[in-house]
Image (cartoon, rainbow, N blue to C red):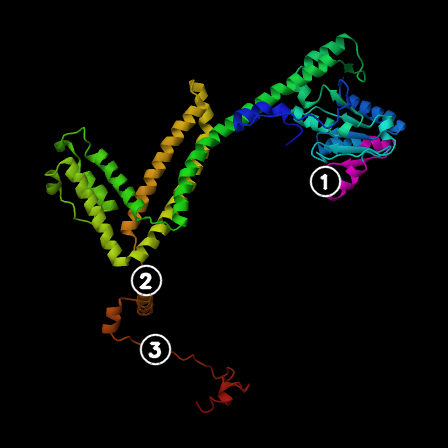
Amino acid sequence: MTGTAKTEEDEFLKIYKLPVVVVPTNKPVIRTDEPDLIYKTKRAKYNAVANAVDELHATGRPILIGTTSITQSEELSGLLKKRKVPHNVLNAKYHEQEAEIIKDAGQLGAVTIATNMAGRGTDIILGDGVAELGGLAIIGTERHESRRIDNQLRGRAGRQGDPGSSRFYLSLEDDLMRLFAADRIAKVMDKLGMEEDEPIEHSIVTSSIEHAQKKVEARNFDMRKNVLEYDDVMNQQREVIYAQRRKVLKGEELRESIMYMIKEIIKSEMNQYANEKLYPEEWTLDGLIEDAESIYAPKGSLKKEELEAMSRDELGEALVKIAEDNYAAREAEFTPGVMRELEKVIMLRVVDNKWMEHLDHMDMLRQGINLRAYGQRNPLVEYKIEGYNMFEEMIHQIQTDIAKLMYRVSVVTEERQQVEDRLATAQASHGGDVEDAEAKPVKKAPVRAEHIGRNDPCPCGSGKKYKNCCGKGK
């Protein structure tokens, strides 16, 4: 539930499939929303805001001034200080003070400067006698690109049937005005001979500004929708990868999954080297043997002469049988328990590494895909096609790398590791093979005594010269 969703109902419906339903207020809104005042320059606008604050403050009405930035709020604060108007600044820089400032913002004579981010959604309670004076006065110093933000500022007054008023002070130098119709309005003001501090005030101008806001909102919506459509491509791929990872982490049996990958590799090899559209004499069996032996087949297990005598179906079955037999042999060598653990470790490692690489590649594709528009192609469609092809290539690489590691990796047990460590230590100590070290006696290096001069201090520590102590008579 929110009080400002009505202006964004198209986005809620188109993206999230959620309709927006307006619930009537508990009490009628009697707040007065006055037309905007437009000035030529920001300086004239700020002076007009300060004059309005002076007038309202003299009556005792509480005032809430809304700004679009901390810099703007501090600039207005400096202007009010020069006019000796007591006020509080609420700009989300001092969170611990916000509650106290907001609590007193509706009291008699209170002046509060707040950014759009400060104190949103807070009920400002009116003090005694404030309702009779007209309630809380809202002064906006600039229109935001989104009407929702402006409505949030207006909505801080006139809650629960309280009286109040709101008015926005704008200048032709504001960001939104510079984007839409600032030049046209400036020409009108010049033709009419209007001074810098003389404002334009008309409901048509206010409605034109709201129309400009709608244009900006529509543009921002299209940008968000476009980003979402690009993200959907990655989300679909992410679901596939994460489903595989969850399967590993939950400890499910992976042998069937790996055998499926190996069969997919064999199917790909058959399409590449023994395509069904080619005659058997056109098959590239040398390439098939080399590719198979690099992944799952033991060296020398595939003979070209034997393969030439097989049909395509028999060839595929023979490759699958060799892969399964080799896998079973490794499982018997390492034990099933070790093999199951090996499957988990290898699959997680390969999937994670390839997925990280794929994310980088997709990010690079996303950055440059908009250039396809110059070739009269839809960048989103091109992104989906390229992304799908890259994902398929990544899946193939994952299957190939997992299969290679499962057939080529060596498992080192603790006992074997200790033996290898001892061999390495012996080799390092003797500088050669262990057998050579055992066969040949090791010659001890001669111990050379350091020469001590007759006039040197005696090494026994007596403090005497060597010739008068231990070296006496030598």
**Residue 244 at x, y percent in the picture:** 38, 43
**Residue 126 at x, y percent in the picture:** 82, 33
Give the numbered dot on residue 437: none
**Residue 52 at x, y percent in the picture:** 83, 24
Question: Quarter holding the N terminus?
Answer: top right
Q: Earlier in the sequence, mark 1 or mark 3?
A: 1
Task: Name the residue nearer the viewer: 202 or 185.
Answer: 202
| Residue found at the very far top of the displayed protein | 191
Residue 331 as seen in the image, left or right of residue 131: left
Find out whether residue 90 is within the magenta segment: yes
Secondary-structure class at tag 3: loop
Tell me the residue that label 3 is attached to: 446
Residue type beneath disc 2 = Thr
Dots 1, 2 in contact, CB < 8 A: no
Residue type beneath disc 3 = Pro
Residue at 77 percent across and 14 percent down: it is 200
Of tags 1 and 3, the one toward the viewer is 1
Q: Give how far apart the Cα atoms at labels 1 and 2 are.
A: 60 Å
Tell me the residue that label 2 is attached to: 413
Dots 2, 3 in contact, CB < 8 A: no
Q: Give how far apart the Cα atoms at labels 2 and 3 are.
A: 42 Å
Question: Quarter holding the C terminus?
Answer: bottom left
Tell me the residue that label 1 is attached to: 93
Disc 3 residue crowd, few under 14, some 14–19, many 20+, Cα 10 Å: few
Q: Which contiguous range is marked in magenta? A: 77-104
